[in-house]
C-alpha cells in the first residue's frame, strides 16, 4: 500500500512492483478511486497477471485452504444446525410470475440440471 496524492486528493492504494522496463501505469483501480473517467469508446478487453509475482499469495492461499478444508471442499455445502429467521414487511403479499420459456434446444439440459439440483437437496419441487 502507498499513499498517492493527485488532483488535490490523497488515497491509500495497492501498488504492484515488477521487474520490467515497461512504462508505469496509473491502473484502472487507481483511476476509479480518483474518479477519472475512461475515454469515450474505451473498454477493457482483458486483464493479464504476471507470473512469479504472486508466489507469496499462492502460498498464503494454500495455507488458508488447508486450515479451512470444510469451506473449500468440492461440491455444494449445506448449513446444518442453524435456524434462520426471515423478516417480511407486514402486509407483504407474495408475487407469482410465469416461468420463463426455455429454448427447445436447451430443454433437456435444463431438465437434467434441475434433476441434479433436486437430487442434491439444493432445490425442491413446489406446487
Image (cartoon, grey):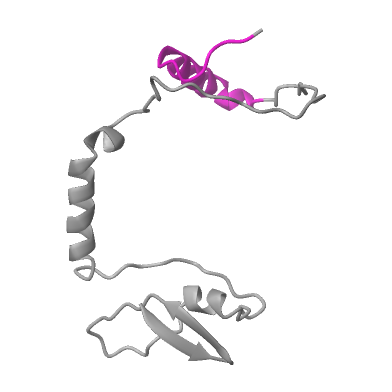
Residue ID at (46%, 20%): 122
Can you say which quadrant of the picture contains the N terminus?
Answer: bottom left
| Residue 85 pos. (x, y %) | 57, 25
Q: Report the magenta stretch's main SS.
A: helix
x%, y% of residue 62? 19, 50
Q: Position of residue 44 (x, y in %)?
A: 52, 69
Q: Nearer the viewer, residue 44 or 124?
A: 124
Report the residue that reaches farthest toward the top: 127
Is 69 inside the magenta-drawn segment?
Answer: no
Q: Is residue 96 left or right of residue 58?
A: right
**Foreground pick, 116 / 109:** 116
Q: Does residue 115 belong to the magenta stretch?
A: yes
Residue drawn at point x = 26 percent, y = 32 percent = 70
Quadrant in the picture for residue 56: bottom left
In this view of the protein, which residue sits in the foreground, 22 or 60? 60
Task: Write down the region rendered in magenta.
Answer: 102-126
Q: Is residue 49 above or below residue 75?
A: below
Say above or below: 4 vs 87.
Answer: below
Q: Quadrant of residue 49?
A: bottom left
Residue at (49%, 90%) from the top-left corner?
A: 5
Is residue 61 placed above or below 122 in the rendered structure?
A: below
Looking at the rendered image, the quarter that the C terminus falls into is top right
Please name the residue shown 23% across and 61% down the image: 57
Image mark count: 0
Judging depth in this view, the residue of 54 and 85 nearest the camera is 85
Query: In this image, 126 relative to 60: left or right?
Result: right
State left or right for residue 84 relative to residue 71: right
Amino acid at each position: 500500500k502507498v499513499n498517492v496524492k493527485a488532483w488535490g486528493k490523497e488515497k491509500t492504494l495497492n501498488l504492484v512492483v515488477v521487474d520490467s522496463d515497461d512504462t508505469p501505469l496509473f491502473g484502472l483501480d487507481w483511476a476509479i478511486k480518483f474518479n477519472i473517467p475512461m475515454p469515450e469508446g474505451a473498454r477493457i478487453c482483458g486483464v493479464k497477471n504476471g507470473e512469479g509475482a504472486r508466489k507469496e499469495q499462492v502460498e498464503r492461499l494454500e495455507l488458508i485452504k488447508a486450515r479451512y478444508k470444510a469451506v473449500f471442499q468440492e461440491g455444494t455445502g449445506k448449513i446444518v444446525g442453524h435456524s434462520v429467521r426471515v423478516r417480511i414487511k407486514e402486509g407483504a403479499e407474495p408475487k407469482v410470475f410465469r416461468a420463463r420459456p426455455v429454448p427447445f434446444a436447451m430443454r433437456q439440459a435444463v431438465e437434467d440440471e434441475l434433476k441434479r439440483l433436486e437430487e442434491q437437496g439444493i432445490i425442491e419441487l413446489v406446487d
